[in-house]
Image (cartoon, grey):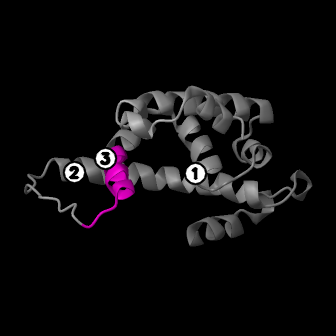
Amino acid sequence: MAETFLAAFKRRHTYDAARGGPRPWLYGIAIRLIGKHRRAESRYQRMLLSVPQDPMTEDRGDRSIERVLAGQLRPVLAATLDGMSARDRELLLLTAWAELTYDEAAQATGLTVSAVRSRLYRIRKKIRKELKTAVPAYLQGTESDQEENDNR
């Protein structure tokens, strides 16, 4: 966050107050910084994969089922996010993690609101398909529940 505000301060002359609040502008800056960090992390992960690793045993005795399921889904979700285009991943994270509205996400990414809605629909559908095989059947909602969640 500090890096985002530092970059924003350096680029304060580019801010257009007529476009609304600064939140989408700041998230746009954050997207670019996150991209830089993500590329650095990717290089670091590739380096770690080249080093032999010790086998680890995991004690799941004290974990709740939610934590176990999250641990099982993490690699699938990470691979799914990694397989997305940068623009799709950024849009998903802006709305899901940063909790931007469709209007704010449109401003941050330079898209129209209708493009944000349709792109998010396709992204969520793809993620649902990828995760469906990793989630036990008793935890999966019905298709109508998933469609209803997409419309929120």
Write the residue at 80% across / 58% down: 15
Q: Secondary structure at mark 3?
A: helix
Instruction: Determine whether, in the image, residue 60 is placed left or right of residue 96.
Output: left
Write the residue at 49% across / 33% down: 127
Residue stretch in magenta: 62-74
Residue 114 vs 18, above or below: the answer is: above
Q: Nearer the viewer, residue 104 or 74?
A: 74
Q: Position of residue 133 (x, y in %)?
A: 36, 30
- Residue 135 in the magenta stretch? The answer is no
Tell us which disc is closer to us: 3 or 1: 3
Residue 6 vs 110, above or below: the answer is: below
Amino acid at dot 3: Gln
Q: Secondary structure at mark 2?
A: helix
> Whole-Å distance between the Cαs marked 2 and 1?
23 Å
Q: Position of residue 9 (x, y in %)?
A: 70, 69
> Whole-Å distance between the Cαs marked 2 and 3?
23 Å
Amino acid at dot 2: Met
Write the residue at 31% across / 46% down: 72
Task: Point out which mark residue 72 bears.
Answer: 3
Q: Say which label, 2 or 1, has the lower sequence index.
A: 1
Is residue 117 visible from the viewing direction of this image?
yes
Quarter containing the C terminus: top right
Task: Point out which mark residue 18 bears.
Answer: none
Q: Which residue is mark 2?
A: 47
Q: Quadrant of residue 57?
A: bottom left
Q: Which residue is mark 1?
A: 32
Q: Secondary structure at mark 1?
A: helix
Residue 9 vs 119, above or below: the answer is: below
Is disc 3 in contact with disc 1, using a CB cutoff of under 8 Å? no
> Whole-Å distance between the Cαs marked 3 and 1?
29 Å
